Amino acid sequence: MENVKKNRVKKFRESIPLSISELARKAELTPQTIAKMEKGLPTRKHSELKVAKALQKTYEEVFSQ
């Protein structure tokens, strides 16, 4: 089974609301990276930190189990 990382990226993104493209622009990442993150696929910690900042949340709020 794939190593799926639970996170709240999609939940927080939709509550703002932002599209995947808008969040990607704010975080200076590609929409593909955001989509991977939302699926729980492995992404770099640096990218995850950028997303948390763009969502105005702490890393722990978004990515802790």
Image (cartoon, rainbow, N blue to C red):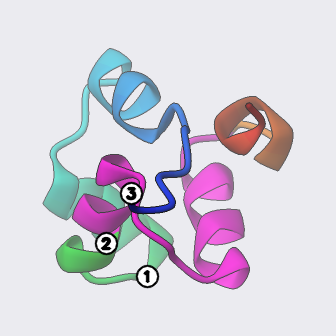
Q: Which mark is residue 1?
A: 3
Q: Is residue 45 above or below residue 54?
A: below
Reading the image, the residue beneath label 2 is 25
Among the two numbered marks 3 and 2 on one chain, the one whose residue lies closer to the N terminus:
3
* Quadrant in the rendering for residue 51: bottom right
Disc number placed over residue 2 in the picture, else none: none
Q: What is the distance, in whole Å, between disc 3 and disc 2 at their CAs?
A: 32 Å
- Amino acid under label 2? Arg
Residue closest to the eye, 42 or 27: 42
Q: Tell which of 26 and 47 is nearer to you.
A: 47
Examine the rendered structure and indicate whether residue 10 appears above or below residue 47: above
Residue 52 image offset from top left, x and y in percent: 65, 51
Residue 54, horizontal then vertical, whole percent: 56, 54
Residue type, numbered disc 1 = Glu
Residue type at numbered disc 3: Met
Q: Secondary structure at mark 2?
A: helix
CA–CA distance in space, label 1 to label 3: 31 Å
Give the residue displayed 40% in from the left and 65% down from the top.
Answer: 41
Quadrant that contains the C terminus: top right
Tell me the quarter of the image containing the N terminus.
Answer: bottom left
Residue 50 as seen in the image, left or right of residue 57: left
- Relative placement, left or right, of 47 versus 45 is left
14 in magenta? no
Which residue is farthest top?
Answer: 15
Residue linked to disc 1: 28
Label 3 with label 2: CB-CB less than 8 Å: no
Among the two numbered marks 1 and 3 on one chain, the one whose residue lies closer to the N terminus = 3
Question: Are there few (<14), some (14-19), or many (20+) residues within 10 Å of tag 2?
Answer: few
Which span of residues is magenta-colored?
34-56
Residue 61 in the image, given as x and y percentages of width and height: 76, 30
Q: Is residue 51 above or below residue 46?
A: above
Residue at 19% x, 54% y is: 20
